[in-house]
Image (cartoon, helix red, strand yellow):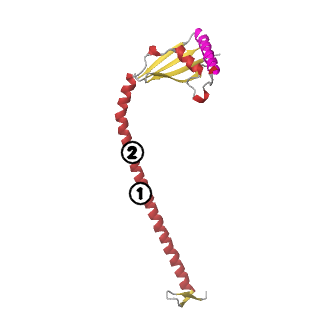
Amino acid sequence: MANTTSFAPSVNGSSQRRSSSSVRSSSSTTSSSSNEIIDTISNELLIQYGLMAIGALLILKLIFTALNMIILFALPVIYLYASANCPSNDTFDAKKELKRVMRGAHLPEEHQPKGFIEKSLTKLTASITTEIATSLGYEIRINDYFGIAKMACVTVQFAGYEYYWIGIFDRWRYMGQREIPTNT
């Protein structure tokens, strides 16, 4: 391999003569120093991201510790309030609650009947359907849960459905219905 010469500018602006072997070593030195700079920058970024992640975890731990303390103090108060305001079994009127469900009282505003005629027809239909369904018999089961809530289940065999309510904070709230499986 022949040694070639090239001219490289110097710091003061004059050109200096260098051999190609010195140019190659100069470029490899430049690339290794640039890799070191990139490695140093990426290491600094990794350290910064790591410290930010540790800081975020510490902040989350503080938040969850504070929430845990609030829950520990609020839970007994909520329990006492719910147990003091749990509705009794005799406040549940199955026919009245079924009429409300048939009327659509549990539905959101946009799905409730609009206008006088539609509301009247819905009430009439709900009353007739409830009376017919319950006249052939229905069963009420009420389960108590730790004295803070009650679950009422009304089984209407004629309609083929079970209706569920939960009694909590002095009110009975409709939860849903399910079809009774037929054994044929």
Q: x, y (%) of residue 143?
A: 46, 19
Residue 181, located in which quarter of the rendered image? top right
The kind of residue on which mark 1 rests is Leu
Crowding at mark 1 (Cα within 10 Å: few <14, some 14-19, many 20+): few
**Mark 1 falls on what kind of element?**
helix
- Spot occupied by residue 135 in the image (x, y as percentages of width and height): 59, 8
x then y, percent, for residue 88: 43, 17
- Residue range in magenta is 117-136
The answer to whether the residues at label 1 and label 2 have Cβ atoms under 8 Å apart is no
Q: Is residue 9 above or below residue 146?
A: below
Q: Nearer the viewer, residue 141 or 126?
A: 126
Q: Residue at x 38, y 29 (%)?
A: 78
Q: In screen coordinates, is 180 left or right of 166?
A: right
Q: Residue 36 appears at what percent x and percent y?
A: 48, 71
Residue 51 is marked as 1
Q: Specify which label sits upstream in the sequence, 1 or 2.
A: 1
